[in-house]
Image: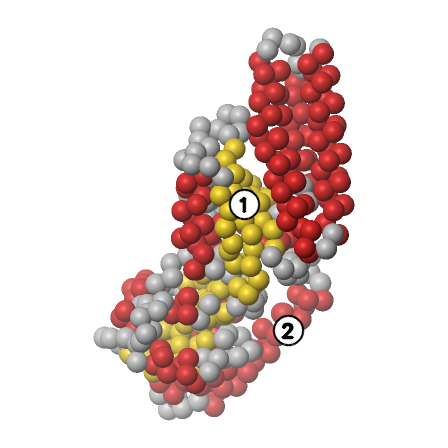
């Protein structure tokens, strides 16, 4: 019982120190590295001292009730979730096992969405390989690591990532503990609406207005002129709905007919691209099904530009929509839409609206003059 009491006192002291660290978030930016070092020390203390101590007590023959075990687990879970710094548990492939509350706010994603997906999907393309390599090294037992990365939606703000190896009880492999600390003041989190509110109503109204403008454009477009109809539809979508709109038309073989980009220079870089070199276009043409991707994992999904750089990386694409225009079961054209940088990714509601508009565009393409 003496060891149990001592363990309980140590836990109480640990919780007190966590509360002090939480209060220290208000220190000046220059002092934050010191706070981060202290936080890493406390996390190491849990992994190296408190957790093995708990396992020894659990298996040492001292009677413990199921209720007491649940209380200990609840306490450790509460410490993880209430920790003031963004913390993630990932495996050797950098796939997220768990995020704490601070991490979900900092990364701007829900824990349920991130779990089971690579944490690298939230990072800038240039940082993904380095992070994945460092995580694998830590998981192999080669020591703790630290590196600077950038979030894809805030590429100008550096984030310090510290990686440490932990071995939770019952896990067959080493888990990597990732602590994130912004190099600059953290970007404001995008709150996810849990119930319909004014923001949601505004978005719905914007989609309704977009559909109305698209209908007007299709009714005034030249009937049966495929390229003219697609070009006019692309102009409606550009700017207000997507940063880039790329149209490829044809029957036996697609050809690039329209590229609307943030600038003329960027548009010209893709005008000469062969759609056959874009895996996303060829897959959409083959299946005849629309595709929605948020934080695309494959940087070469849309091929490369004339300079040999991946298009998705060069344009900092954070989400994309690729929809086919089908006539009698055959794909006659493909529309690809990009959103870049900090802009809100395409939602399922927007993808459904675009799917509806694509059918209307197909009807206008086949209409008899």
The percent coordinates of residue 118 (x first, y second) are 46, 48
Nearer to us in this view, 208 or 273: 273
Which color scheme does this rendered protein use?
secondary structure
Tell me, yes or no, if residue 271 can be seen here. Answer: yes
Quadrant for the C terminus, please.
bottom left
Q: Identify the residue at image location x=40%, y=53%.
A: 129
Residue 38, above or below 208? above
Q: Identify the residue at image location x=53%, y=29%.
A: 168
Label 1: how many Cα within 10 Å (few below 14, some 14–19, many 20+): many
Tag on residue 205?
Answer: 2
Residue 352, above or below 62? below
- Residue 254 appears left or right of 185: left
- Residue 32 appears left or right of 323: right
The percent coordinates of residue 121 (x first, y second) are 47, 54
Q: Identify the residue at image location x=41%, y=57%.
A: 297
Q: Identify the residue at image location x=32%, y=68%.
A: 303
- The residues tagged by marks 2 and 1 sit, at their Cα atoms, a distance apart of 43 Å
Secondary element at tag 1:
strand
Secondary element at tag 2:
helix
Tell me, yes or no, if residue 96 can be seen here. Answer: no
The percent coordinates of residue 272 (x first, y second) are 30, 80
Of marks 2 and 1, which one's residue comes earlier in the chain? 1
The percent coordinates of residue 194 (x first, y second) are 67, 55
For the image, the number of numbered tags is 2
Quadrant for the N terminus, please.
top right
Quarter of the figure with residue 268: bottom left
What residue did someone put label 1 on? Answer: 162
Most distant residue in the top direction: 61
């Amino acid at each position: 019982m003496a060891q149990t009491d001592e363990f309980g006192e140590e836990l109480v002291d640990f919780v007190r120190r966590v509360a002090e660290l939480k209060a220290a978030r208000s220190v000046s930016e220059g002092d934050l590295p010191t706070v981060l070092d202290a936080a890493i020390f406390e996390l190491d203390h849990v992994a190296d001292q408190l957790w093995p101590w708990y396992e020894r007590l659990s298996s040492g023959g001292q009677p413990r009730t199921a209720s007491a075990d649940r209380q200990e687990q609840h306490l450790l879970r509460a410490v993880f979730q209430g920790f003031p710094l963004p913390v993630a548990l990932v495996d050797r492939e950098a796939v997220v096992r768990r995020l704490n509350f601070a991490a979900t706010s900092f990364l701007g994603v829900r824990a349920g969405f991130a779990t089971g997906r690579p944490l690298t999907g939230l990072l800038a393309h240039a940082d993904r390989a380095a992070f994945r390599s460092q995580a694998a090294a830590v998981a192999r037992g080669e020591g703790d690591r630290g590196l600077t990365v950038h979030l894809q939606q805030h590429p100008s703000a550096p984030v310090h990532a510290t990686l440490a190896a932990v071995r939770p009880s019952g896990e067959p492999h080493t888990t990597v503990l990732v602590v994130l600390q912004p190099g600059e003041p953290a970007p404001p989190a995008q709150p996810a609406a849990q119930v319909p509110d004014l923001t949601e109503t505004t978005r719905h109204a914007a989609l309704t207005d977009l559909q109305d403008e698209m209908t007007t454009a299709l009714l005034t477009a030249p009937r049966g002129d495929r390229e003219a109809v697609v070009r006019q539809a692309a102009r409606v979508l550009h700017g207000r709905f997507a940063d880039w709109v790329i149209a490829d038309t044809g029957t036996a073989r697609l050809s690039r007919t329209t590229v609307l980009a943030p600038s003329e220079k960027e548009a010209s870089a893709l005008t000469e691209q062969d759609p056959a070199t874009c895996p996303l276009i060829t897959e959409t043409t083959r299946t005849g099904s629309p595709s929605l991707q948020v934080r695309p994992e494959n940087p070469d999904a849309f091929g490369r530009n004339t300079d040999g750089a991946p298009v998705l990386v060069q344009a900092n694409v954070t989400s994309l929509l690729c929809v086919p225009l089908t006539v009698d079961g055959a794909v006659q054209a493909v529309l690809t839409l990009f959103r870049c940088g900090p802009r809100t990714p395409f939602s399922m509601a927007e993808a459904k609206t675009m799917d509806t508009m694509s059918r209307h565009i197909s009807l206008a393409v086949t209409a008899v003059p």
